Image (cartoon, rainbow, N blue to C red):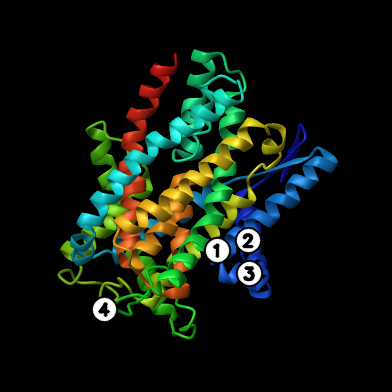
Amino acid sequence: MEYADGVLHVESFLAITIGIVALFVGRRINRNLEMLRQLSIPEPVTGGLLLSILLALLFALSGVAIEFEMGFRDFLLNYFFATIGINATVADLRKGGRPLAILMLITLGYMFVQNLTGISIAVLFDVPAVLGMLGGGISLIGGHGTTIAWAPVVAENFGIVNAMEVGIACATGGLVLASLMGGPIARYLVNRHGLEPETIEPQDVGLAEDQPNQIVTYLDFLDAVLAIHVTIIVAALFDEGLEYFDINVPFFVSCLLAGMLITNLFAGRMPRVSGMRWPNRKPAMALIADLSLGTFLAMSLMSLKLWVLIDLAGPILAMLLAQFLVAVSLAMFAVFPLMGRNYDAAVICSGFGGISLGSTPTAMANMAAVSQRYGASHQAFIVVPLVSAFFISVVNALLIPLFLRFLS
């Protein structure tokens, strides 16, 4: 650890150790608070948010900020999406065709509504309308990465000197709300309509609550790790090919695609040094997915600088509240009925809560918590990340400059 200028820098090894501790703390809290279990709040969300609140109190009392080195966290994200790709089959993709198209259209409409909502709240509070973009598609459905990319453009072109702080505050608040809304939405829909999975299938992430004792040997675990590493190597080659054609996608998307490609084209046709069959939908693969996603999310949330939200209250909090209400309403009254009013639709709604205000990993964590409680939904774990990773990134890259030109 190094301390300089009021900031304590925590290196990767200690950061991931603290993240694991936060996850276990969240697990113990969830086990002792029935309300959190009933609402399917992910354990890493509980632990990560608690730690971020404690760090915010430390900053308020001492002025010392703690920053974590997050390199290993991003490695876990690639691991997780490789497992999702490995678990995807052609049957899932065929089944996801129509729901995928419907969710894309819903999301497109929502992205317009989200920007218009932010702009309306900004005008209502008599602040520059462009702040509504920073409290809309840039920070919420776009996330921290999009915020970091576009905030300097807003600052330069519109003279908003604190554009980065406003954007990061909205992205941070949105991530918190997204982590908390998915589980309760799914629980309400499942109980209100008496929903359950059509068939009992292995989990995409983790093990079901009623099947905690499945045996995973060290060879099962290593075989799954080997498959993931092969997938990531293929993803790296795929990524280089895309860069040659000037196409840039997040590396975790390449991991998702590589896993899908290997599972559907080569798995069962190629010899494996382990002598085992390709480990898609095996308990070891689900276990690694759970480990990767849980630790990633705990580290992401514990590193949030919540004090930024305190400094930028007023219209920012109003924007977040309005966006939260819009996202919940859309999930309940548009996504659920249009996706079929079935169990898969309820799980997709929990994921939509994640991508509408947070990020793809948040969406996946929401769906993992729900599916582990009520049952697997392979369709949700294919449809939601494809919409979030591909569609949103492409559309937002076109939509943001369109709105900024309108506001200039």
On the image, numbered disc 2 is attached to which residue?
A: 46
In x, y percent, where is residue 168?
58, 35
Tag nearer the camera, 4 or 2: 2
Q: CA distance from mark 3 to mark 1?
A: 12 Å
On the image, numbered disc 1 is attached to which residue?
A: 42
Q: Amino acid at mark 1?
A: Pro
Q: Amino acid at mark 3?
A: Met
How would you rate the neighbour count of disc 1 (Cα within 10 Å): few for under 14, some for 14-19, many for 20 or more?
many
Quadrant the C terminus occupies: top left
Q: CA distance from mark 4 to mark 3?
A: 45 Å
Q: Is residue 148 above or below residue 187?
A: above
Determine which of the numbered discs, if any, sits on residue 35 in the image: 3
Q: Amino acid at mark 4?
A: Gly
Residue 402 in which image quadrant: top left
For image coordinates 64% across by 68% down, the residue present is: 24
Q: Amino acid at mark 2?
A: Thr
Q: CA distance from mark 1 to mark 4?
A: 36 Å
Looking at the image, tell me whether mark 4 or mark 3 is earlier in sequence order.
3
Looking at the image, tell me whether mark 4 or mark 2 is earlier in sequence order.
2
Q: Do the residues bearing badges 1 and 2 touch, measured as CB atoms within 8 Å?
A: yes
In x, y percent, where is residue 76?
47, 56
